[in-house]
Image: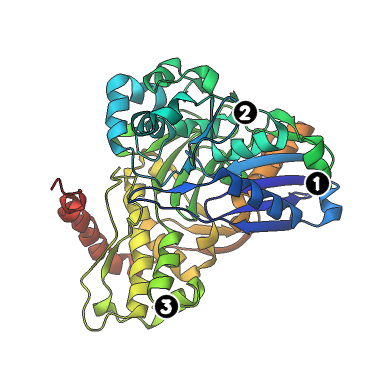
Amino acid sequence: MYLGIDIGTSGVKAVAVNDEGDVVDQGFASLAIQRPRPLHSEQDPEDWWDATEIAVRRISPDRRARIRAIGLSGQMHGATFLDASHRVLRPAILWNDGRSADACAELEAREPGSRRITGNLAMPGFTAPKALWVAKHEPETFERIAKVLLPKDYIRFRMSGDFATDASDASGTLWLDVGRRQWSGDMLAASGLSPEHMPDVFEGSELTGTLLPRIAEGWGMNPVPIVAGGGDNAAGAVGVGVLDDGDAFLSLGTSGVLFVAGSRFCPNPEKGIHAFCHALPGRWHEMTVMLSAASCLDWAAKLTNQQDVPTLISLADEAEEQSVPLFLPYLSGERTPHNDPCARGVFFGMDHGTGPAEIAQSVLEGVAFGVADGFLALDSARQVSSISVIGGGSRSRRWGEILAAMLGKPLVYRRDSDVGPALGAARLARMGVTGDSPTAVCRPTAVIDQIEPSEALRDRLLPKFKRYRSLYQNTEHLFRPSEN
């Protein structure tokens, strides 16, 4: 039995996986985001720990007692600052926080080789610009920083007392030399930090420590080993067997991610593509990221006073096409392909017939258009033959039909896709203690559905997609804060 823990944005998931690779038990505890100012997005790391304890304890005691190893996954980029006594200095600044746009330009000016070293464009969501923001706006806090940890690695510290991370999660900091899979002294120096501020970097299935006896006793477990794990997307790829050149998945969680695995490091920063290490050695991946995906549906359900997201989606069947507006899904800004933290959501083209059903259809289409916009920027898109779907949004077949039409690829729905990152973390834990190969452990889970792209639907949507792209281009300047 192996335990995978995923520190997500909306909650913590824990799954128990048996020796046959089946998810046999799981627990969940929700989390909230604090937005104290415009562009700000934060969480208290203590809330991560409290949610982790709840999620783990929701797995049955008999299964907890049989856990052999633990793997960790988590939301990427979150800046968690500890002092010399290992106390948290301030709330963690999250991946969808946009306050550090100016710091991105400053970072690249300080280190002109930034894109060559990291393979990535400096974006406000990454960790390094957040450190520069803290140095400028909270200098007393910055001076006290002794360690910088990512969300899952703060939980690792609480579990084992070790400072460690993995290469996939570290890729999203802008401090990693992604091709060499090690910290870059030049990038750290450009941020006013040093390698001593960083955790050690491991591959995803390598052991980093052991569960502390007091934590193990409280969880009804043995002091089992903990592996490095992976960032949520790389761990999700391990969970659905996306390992080799051209293997791909679409994650429909709080954010929307298109992930294409590969055996080479292929940076393309000018198009806003993320080029990161995979959670397995000798593998990398390209990734497009939109900051609001399934979270747009949560927002729209509240906006239209619907009971929940499934109820909202069911309304879309009743939508009158002529009254469906265009929707820009940039509720938290956007990354690929715009790298625009100031971008905001827009409904355009409403009329007297626009009601909850039309809003529902508009949001489903708008997020699909955003995903397709990123897919067009991927050089590796031509290698992709089909796309597995993971995350909470994977439950909607109607949304899948729209997405398949816009991407022009079959969408494959697999068993346990809604717990992909936690499942991947558990698989990495198994490899860490058994020495089993990735190909033996990381097989794709069983297919439960497949949606083929509809040419008729694509032909109907493409004119709207063209207007969608034009809408952002024509409103981009209006999102900028006024100087007056």
Q: Which residue is mark 2?
A: 164
Q: Residues within 10 Å of mark 1 (few under 14, many from 20)?
A: few
Name the residue furthest front: 140
Q: Is residue 199 visible?
A: yes
The numbered mark, 3 or 1, whose residue comes first in the sequence reads: 1
Q: Position of residue 150 (x, y in %)?
A: 54, 36
The residue type indicated by label 1 comes to Gly
The numbered mark, 2 or 1, whose residue comes first in the sequence reads: 2
Q: Which residue is mark 3?
A: 305
Residues at marks 2 and 1, CA–CA distance in whole angstroms: 23 Å
Residues at marks 3 and 2, CA–CA distance in whole angstroms: 44 Å
Task: Residue at 56%, 40% (x, y): give it.
Answer: 151
The residue type indicated by label 3 comes to Asn
Mark 1 secondary-structure assignment: helix
Between 78 and 376, which is closer to the camera in this rendering?
78
Determine which quarter of the picture holds residue 346: bottom left
The residue type indicated by label 2 comes to Ala
Q: Which residue is mark 1?
A: 218
Residues at marks 3 and 1, CA–CA distance in whole angstroms: 41 Å
Mark 2 secondary-structure assignment: strand
**Residue 462 vs residue 125: left or right?**
left
Identify whether 240 is placed above or below 393: above
**Residue 25 vs residue 62: left or right?**
left
